[in-house]
Amino acid sequence: MDYLDVANGSILFILCALAIGVVAIQAVIFIFVAWRRGQEIGLSKQVMRRTMSNSAIFSIVPSLPIIVMMLALSQALGRYFPWLRLSVVGSAAYEGMAADLAAQSMGLQGFADPNMSPTIFIVIMFVMTVGIIWGIIFNIFFMNRLDKFSKNQKEKAAGGFITIFSSALFIALLVTLSVPHVANVNNIEAIVAFVSAGVVVMILNKVADVTKWRILSDFSLPIALIAGMATVIFYGNLM
């Protein structure tokens, strides 16, 4: 059996649609609850409508990298599972990394390896799901205490421990995600994509600072992702 028969099958579609439907219903309920609460505290309907429309517009920009990653994953993992992962709890950076690690642990080059099988596809689904669930569990039991600790630290001293610790964690995350690809001289395409995307981001941010067109800076990440992929395609055809 071809694994895509499973990945694009009706059973997986129904399961994914049910999970996404639950999240969509929750979002609608929260909107009605927030609207009712706004009326209770005296906000005008005009203010609430403007807030909702502005939030919807600003949510477009962060969604673009997610859409690009969903399309990239869909080529190898089918239409439905990437749709579920990137519609509910996944992130553009995590999903690709988790899928690659799971595929490599099963002896493949990556999740796009043509030797994918139904068994390996299920392993990838399992790893992508279980690998990210711990953040949700942590938030349920410990986020309230962590939030109070963070607030107390920020009130004690600006630039104190919590600021340094947060910056260190962010840098460690970037290093973990990028170094395995950038330092792999056997994968020139990854280096080309990384460097070209980084150059595009710097150029867009510089132009945004000079021209005051903040939209260039806001859209720098999705534009850089597309530019990186386009550069790799050009490099592949050229070489």
Image: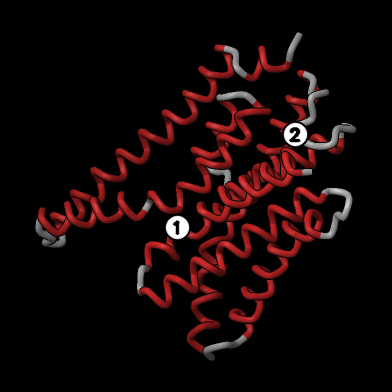
- Tell me what residue is drawn at x 49 percent, y 70 percent: 205
Of the numbered discs 2 and 1, the one sitting upstream in the chain is 2
Tell me the distance, in whole angstroms, between the alpha carbons under discs 2 and 1: 27 Å
Q: Nearer the viewer, residue 167 or 65?
A: 65
Q: Is residue 102 left or right of residue 209?
A: right
Residue lying furthest top? 1
Q: Nearer the viewer, residue 209 or 113?
A: 209
Q: Is residue 58 above or below residue 236?
A: below
- Tell me what residue is drawn at x 69 percent, y 57 percent: 194
Residue lying furthest front? 238
Q: Dot 2 lies on which element?
A: loop
> Are discs 2 and 1 less than 8 Å apart at CB?
no
Q: Dot 1 lies on which element?
A: loop
- Tell me what residue is drawn at x 51 percent, y 63 percent: 144
Q: Amino acid at mark 1?
A: Phe
Q: Is residue 11 left or right of residue 53?
A: right
Residue wearing tag 2: 111
Crowding at mark 1 (Cα within 10 Å: few <14, some 14-19, many 20+): some
- Tell me what residue is drawn at x 61 percent, y 45 percent: 230
Quadrant location of the N terminus? top right
Residue wearing tag 1: 219
Q: How is the image coloured?
A: secondary structure
Q: Nearer the viewer, residue 194 or 25?
A: 194
